[in-house]
Image (cartoon, rainbow, N blue to C red):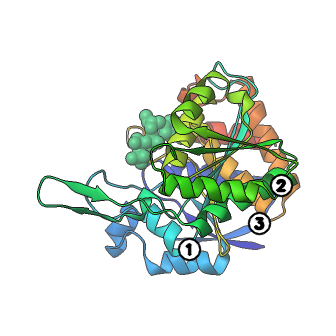
Amino acid sequence: MYKATLIPGDGIGPEVIKAATTVIEAAGVKISWDEKPIGQSAMAKHNNPLPEDTISSIKTNRIALKGPSTTEVGKGFRSANVSLRQRLNLYANIRPIKTIEGANTKYKDIDLIIFRENTEDLYMGVEHMVGKDAAESIKIITRDASERIASMAFNYALKENRKKVTCGHKANIMKLSDGLFLSSVKNIASKYPDIEYEEVIMESLFMKMVMNPEKFDVIVLPNLYGDLLAEMCAGLVGGLGLVPGVNIGVEAAVFEPTHGTAPDIAGQGIANPTAAILCGVMLLEHIGEKEAADRIYNSVRHVIKEGKYVTRDLGGSYSTMDMTKAVIDNL
Ligand code: ATP
């Protein structure tokens, strides 16, 4: 029996996370889940968006499955997600973006993976007003954090027999901060002579990605650009409901879908559970349950390709739980 922290989160979080745990159980892997709140649900219960109890549960179990949590725009409490990443030093955000046949997209054969630095850049929240009518945000980039994410990307490329690593940047404009990120990644790249390495300016990377996404393989990015590009890439494979992810560091791994809380469809039981179920697949791979992970992954692909028991965003009319049941029936 494995132990893991379960954070259902806000909005559609509890609905899709329930789908993921149900599928894992049906695949025969026994996990004892320690359920903890975060975000809005934690505010309501503990008046704290990131209770210490939630942090210590993840520290103990070292793995967590997490739904999205609410972050208010331009006001309110600080993002619990950002705080969680900093508190647990989850320095890498990894998102595999892979075509699933049958999903609503005109692109084929996309198989790329984004390694986004997760602890610094403009997301450190170092910002202040200068008088009433000006605001400053400070972008922080360090060599250590940049080399750390680059090493993770290159190690992954080596292990998984990937051919190319692309580094995205704006060092033409932010010569010091992005310049440091770029030179750090280049330094790591020099240690992997067998892996092709390229550097692409961000706006060009967005354009090339829209035109020929199948040409990309492993991508390494600072925090802000990684956030933006990953969500656009989700669109290329058929939408946010399909893309899983993990926030990972030395102490812990928190598996979490790319999508947000989707308040427009929350509570209706119609959210696509794929991203959350695929987070479960990544979690199972992480703990060494490869066989169960493969079975679930193949079943999800089968259900989407067949296109019968799928949710609205995939062109069907079935509920989250109907689609989940179809995945279980095909395991
Ligand atoms: P948040 O502020 O939490 O990021 P949001 O609505 O701005 O919420 P998302 O939650 O990522 O951002 O949703 C963007 C759009 O994608 C919404 O229209 C939402 O309904 C849709 N969406 C997101 N996740 C799913 C899903 N799992 N299934 C179906 N549609 C989804």
Say whether residue 21 is visible. Answer: no
Mark positioned earlier in the residue sequence (1 or 2): 1
Residue that badge 2 annotates: 192
**Residue 46, picture quadrant:** bottom left
Mark positioned earlier in the residue sequence (1 or 3): 3
x, y percent for residue 299: 79, 39
Q: Amino acid at mark 3?
A: Lys
Residue at 71% over, 51% down: 23
x, y percent for residue 192: 83, 54
Residue that badge 3 annotates: 30
Mark 1 to mark 3: distance in Å?
25 Å
Callout 2 secondary element = loop
Mark 1 to mark 2: distance in Å?
29 Å
Q: Amino acid at mark 1?
A: Leu
Say whether residue 255 is visible. Answer: yes
Residue that badge 1 annotates: 88
Residue at 50% over, 75% down: 87
- Does ligand 1 reach within 8 Å of label 2's beta carbon? no
